Amino acid sequence: MKKIAALTMARNDDFFLQKWVEYYGRELGKENLYIYYDGEDQTIGDFCQGTHAYVHAKIGTQVVEAEKARLRFLSEKATELFSQGYDLVIGVDADEFVVVDPKLGIGLREFLSAQEIDVSLSPLGLDFGQKLDEEGDLSLEKTFLSQRHYAQIGTRYTKPSIIAQPCRWGSGFHRVKGHNFHIVQGLYLMHFGYADRRILEGRLSDADRVAQGWEKHIYKRSRTIRYATEKKAHDFDRYTRWARICQTWCRPLYALNKPAMFELRIVVRIPERFESVL
């Protein structure tokens, strides 16, 4: 089995970070998790016990430059982990979870250990929303996938999240600079950052996020809730299969190492087989 690390950087995000530690700790072992709190005004949560958690000086004050610096920092940390003997490094935000399809009957470490990876591997991106007339507030007391059932298939979250050698992630982990990407079958990146109206409202009232310039970004991405509520949900297996093929072969002219999908907004309903996974 390969030795696999997962790393992230978070600020004012303990709700999702707690789930992040729980999930990746179970899949990879807490001793293989590396967490960086962005800002010396942050406090490491008790739930990080057993992980490698650090408080780092705050990176930047404006969203674009701060994001570039954040990913430069995390790319450097990933390089250090390779020098410590890790075979693979997973880089994701605190609200992102790389999940193996339960129908395969194996966990994340076993799945990734069986893959031949040159530079990077990409799960298919699923951006979860909240169906307002059906789903309540997101809770840590139950699995996320027993509470959220609708997601947009999103190129934005089809990221080269798993790397097999030192390289440089672009902002938001959306690409690996100088390299192509490979979308693997049976693996999904599930993003929950805009899957709860209550949490979104809290982020919009967070003076720190507003000061950094996140307000416009949050408003734009919050439309995922509207899509989940209003759009017809399609068959998961059929449309994810099509999306994987489409994103593999279609690229935007401005970024040939990113996936494209003709700006289609396709919502799928997550099968029941996922409910106990995350």
Image (cartoon, rainbow, N blue to C red):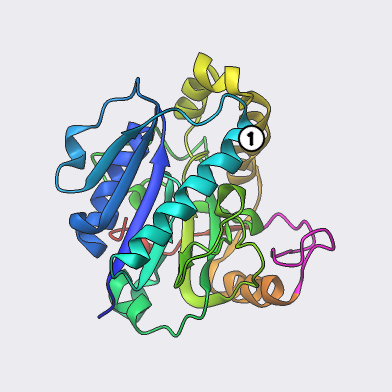
Q: Position of residue 16 (x, y in %)?
A: 36, 39
Q: Position of residue 256 (x, y in %)?
A: 76, 67
102 sits left or right of 72 in the view:
left
Q: Is residue 153 above or below residue 114?
A: above
Count of number-bearing discs: 1
Q: Position of residue 172 (x, y in %)?
A: 57, 48
Which quadrant, please, contains the N terminus?
bottom left
The residue under the point 40% across, 29% down is 57
Q: Which residues are magenta?
A: 250-266
Residue type at the position of mark 1: Glu
22 or 274, which is in the foreground? 22
Would residue 92 be seen by someone viewing this image from the given angle?
A: no
Q: Which residue is mark 1?
A: 65
- Label 1, residues with CA under 10 Å away: few <14, some 14-19, many ≥20: few
Would residue 201 be seen by someone viewing this image from the given angle?
A: yes
The residue under the point 62% across, 26% down is 62
Q: Is residue 24 above or below residue 241?
A: above
Say whether residue 262 is magenta.
yes
Say whether residue 60 is magenta.
no
Most distant residue in the right direction: 253
148 or 74, which is in the foreground? 74
Q: Position of residue 110 (x, y in %)?
A: 29, 78
The residue under the point 40% across, 72% down is 101
Say which quarter of the image contains residue 246.
Answer: bottom right
Which quadrant, please, contains the C terminus?
bottom left
The residue under the point 34% across, 51% down is 146
Say which quarter of the image contains residue 164.
Answer: bottom left
Q: Is residue 179 above or below residue 37?
A: below
275 sits left or right of 61 in the view:
left
Assign a secondary structure to mark 1: helix
Q: Main secondary structure of the magenta part?
A: loop
Q: Is residue 52 above or below residue 242?
A: above
